[in-house]
Amino acid sequence: MPVDKNKIMDEIRDVTLIGLATAYIFLLILLVILRREKVGHQWEILLSTFRMTIQLVIVGYILTYIFDNPNVWFSLIALLLMQGFAILNTFQRVGDVPRDMKRIVAVAMFIGTGITIFFFVLWVFRVEPWFKPQYFIPLAGMMIGNSMTGITLGIDALLGGMKDNRILIENALMMGGKPALIVREVSGRAFHQALLPTINSMMGMGIVFLPGMMTGQILAGAPPLLAIKYQIAMMLGILGSVVLTVFMVIRWGSATFFNQRAQLK
């Protein structure tokens, strides 16, 4: 059944500039509280809010042009840019890590998110054409963003676990243990830590809160059951993307702590 775009647009209530401006009142309240309690970080919050606003406005104009002029190259370039920025942001958040680990993060991000995105676009959602930006870019963005968070948490947990258990690992190596077996427990905890946000989100979804994708579709006039089907598929896609990327990072990354002689670096 064809969708009447004009009818949908009539059902979507526009957010006026005045209404949007009043939303910043809560930012002012937060700044006042931070100043009175001498918590600090006011400039950090102001900068993050300013960056969010400017970035979203710019992205809005870019997406408007891309949606009006669908092109396979626009979609692929958008995908590569999102993956690239996610990788750079991960490097900034995890701090100083070995170069080998950075290469693994980049490879895992491209492979893990790429496989999941194209599987869901081509097979699950069956988007035609597959590069249709209204579907391709938002789906890719959600999978890449959640994978970035998972990789960051996984690396932090892996680095912390290797540091806290260094003596135990060295003792196990001296007794002839294999590195892959020795770090299995540390890697397992790091993997679980990376998946926790996604698992918690899935546990509370629908009862504790309504997820963003589902809420957006309902506000746009989509039937609730259709929005639910999209949300279930999207969450499974996010889970798959996070699992693939984090698994590669943890599995390959744990090997970078050892040299060719099976000694800790």
Image (tube, helix red, strand yellow):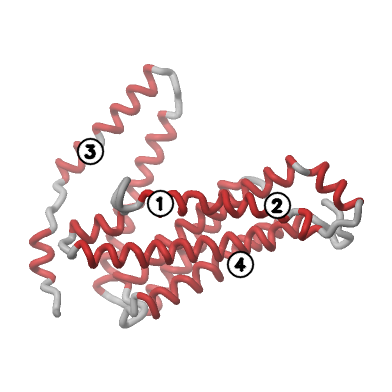
Tag 3–tag 2 contact (CB < 8 Å): no
Q: Secondary structure at mark 2?
A: helix
- Disc 1/disc 3 C-alpha distance (Å): 30 Å
Q: Amino acid at mark 4?
A: Val
> Left or right: 141 with respect to 107?
left
Q: Residues within 10 Å of mark 4 (few under 14, many from 20)?
A: some
Above or below: residue 121 compared with residue 48: below
For the residue pair 213 and 5, the one nearer the viewer reads as 213
- Pointer 4: what residue? 107
Instruction: Please report whichever mark, 1 or 3, sits nearer to the chain's N-terminal start.
Output: 3
Q: Which mark is residue 185?
A: 2
Rendering coords of residue 88 (x, y %): 55, 55
- Disc 2/disc 1 C-alpha distance (Å): 25 Å
For the residue pair 141 and 241, the one nearer the viewer reads as 241
- Disc 4/disc 2 C-alpha distance (Å): 24 Å
Disc nearest the viewer among 4 and 2: 2
- Disc 3/disc 4 C-alpha distance (Å): 40 Å
The residue under the point 31% across, 82% down is 128
Instruction: Please report whichever mark, 2 or 1, sits nearer to the chain's N-terminal start.
Output: 2
The residue under the point 23% across, 61% down is 217
Disc nearest the viewer among 3 and 2: 2
Q: Amino acid at mark 1?
A: Met
Instruction: Please report whichever mark, 3 or 2, sits nearer to the chain's N-terminal start.
Output: 3
Q: Amino acid at mark 2?
A: Glu
Q: Which mark is residue 203?
A: 1
